Image (cartoon, helix red, strand yellow):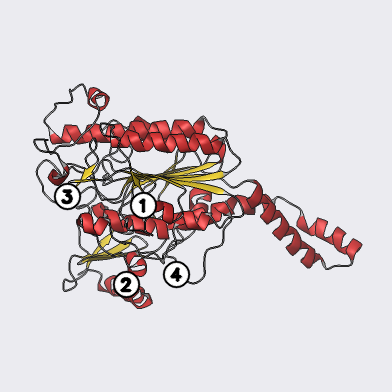
Amino acid sequence: MTTQIHSTLDSVSYPIAANRFARIRGMTAGRWMVIAFLLLQTAFVKADPPNILIITADNLGYGDLPIYNPASPIIAPNLERLASQGARLTNFYTASPTCTVSRACLLTGRIPQRHGLVNQLAGVEGNYGIGLSQKEILVPQILKRSTQSYSTGCFGKWNIGFAEGSRPTERGFDEFLGHASGNIDYYHHIYAGKHDLFKGTNPFDATGTYSTDLFADAAIDFIRRKSSSKDCWFCYVPFNAPHFPSARNKQPGQKNEYQAPDEAFAAYGVSADQADPKRRYDAVVTALDAAIGRLIDAVDDSAAADNTFVFFFSDNGAFQLGRKGLDVGDNAPLKSGGVTCWEGGLRVPALARWPGKIAAGSVVSEPLWSPDLMIACARLSGTELPTDRTFDGRNPLPVLCNGAASPHESMFFNFRSHAALRQGDWKIVREKPTAAWQLFNLAEDIGESHDLAARKPETVAELEQTFAEWNTSL
């Protein structure tokens, strides 16, 4: 939006118009230029704010999608279509390599060390507790401050606290259908023996409905209803797919395996009783892709098709913990995976579409990260951010729309014992505070296989100093 505002204003001959008005009114040309700029900027924001659709996958690997890894066997034509209609981001980072924390970073525009939710919420007690501090301001609350009326909906995985005052409809969302916890059974919607599906704040029974389709259907209904009204809308769809299954979420006698509908297995020419965990995982991703396709179709079929900003990314990388039958996602060509600060945990697939603003089929290689989406939402809606806190996001719209350079000089990561910092093409990383920093040039070594720390101690020292400055600022 900021980019479009500037390009629109730049096309007007302000000096000529201002001089004419100055002669008529006896006012300086400079003052007329300022007034004209402010009036037109305000009018533009009020007249044409876009709808916003943010979609997240759950533990989807960088190398799972053929648009990132041509060797991937996964069938995902709708995400390929989305990439062809907008931008594919190759250096997009989640601010934390785990589900709970990454979602808090997305919704607050702040890194964990600022918003305070630095670890995964554990068990029923954790997921149904306060979680993210209720003093934090979330994206939908920012949009509610817009001079435009934004309707807001969340459909899917919440995972940042479900105590009274922490639930979605108490934190800026008008509508919610989803689950409180980090993962549920896809058909029975059980978490650790507890029914975990809610509409608003009330338990909701949709037993037998595949969760990916359940969340997509709710979001599509929201988009259709709100697109026919005068309100702008913000739709947040945090799918729980393709999160790995958990035995504690299963009913007695139920297999602990990846779950997908029959048609997703049929896409691979296999039946739903397929035993291979990787084939089952692939079907889960294909079912997710089909649901995303239906979401995009709903946008395209609405009157708001050309004025909707769509952003898709994975909350963190696929897990690579060596668990048989579970850790089958692919982060190739990146190293390691979720809950680590290696690239496989932090760098994730991401796509952006905004017709007429983001070039179709473009590739964005400039580094961006998930807190940037808070800033994007504020800019798109013409809303001022509060000044009583530090935001770690920066405006990504000039990068996405105009090919500008990254607004980030560096990116700081710290999860449990792991830590990393990216600055330009350089990255330092360590797996515990007592370990020496390793150094990698990501432009030449995306797989972090050649530690250059011994050869370039001055670069290590420079990045270590930047890391220390981040720590001081926190």
Amino acid beneath label 1 = Asn
Classify residue 429 as left or right of residue 277. Answer: right
Seen at 53% across and 50% down, the residue is: 402
Relative to 292, does residue 317 appear above or below in the rendering? below
- Disc with the residue nearer the chain's start (2 vs 3): 3
Element marked by disc 2: helix
- Return the mark for residue 467: 2
- Return the mark for residue 365: none
Screen quadrant of the C terminus: bottom left
Residues at marks 2 and 3, CA–CA distance in whole angstroms:
26 Å
| Residue 39 location, quadrant | bottom right
Q: Which residue is mark 1?
A: 91
Element marked by disc 3: loop
Amino acid beneath label 3 = Gln
- Return the mark for residue 390: 4
Residues at marks 1 and 3, CA–CA distance in whole angstroms:
20 Å
Classify residue 269 as left or right of residue 390. Answer: left
Q: Which residue is mark 3?
A: 320
Amino acid beneath label 4 = Thr
Classify residue 273 as left or right of residue 295. Answer: left
Seen at 18% across and 25% down, the residue is: 272
Which percent across, then down, holds residue 222?
47, 38
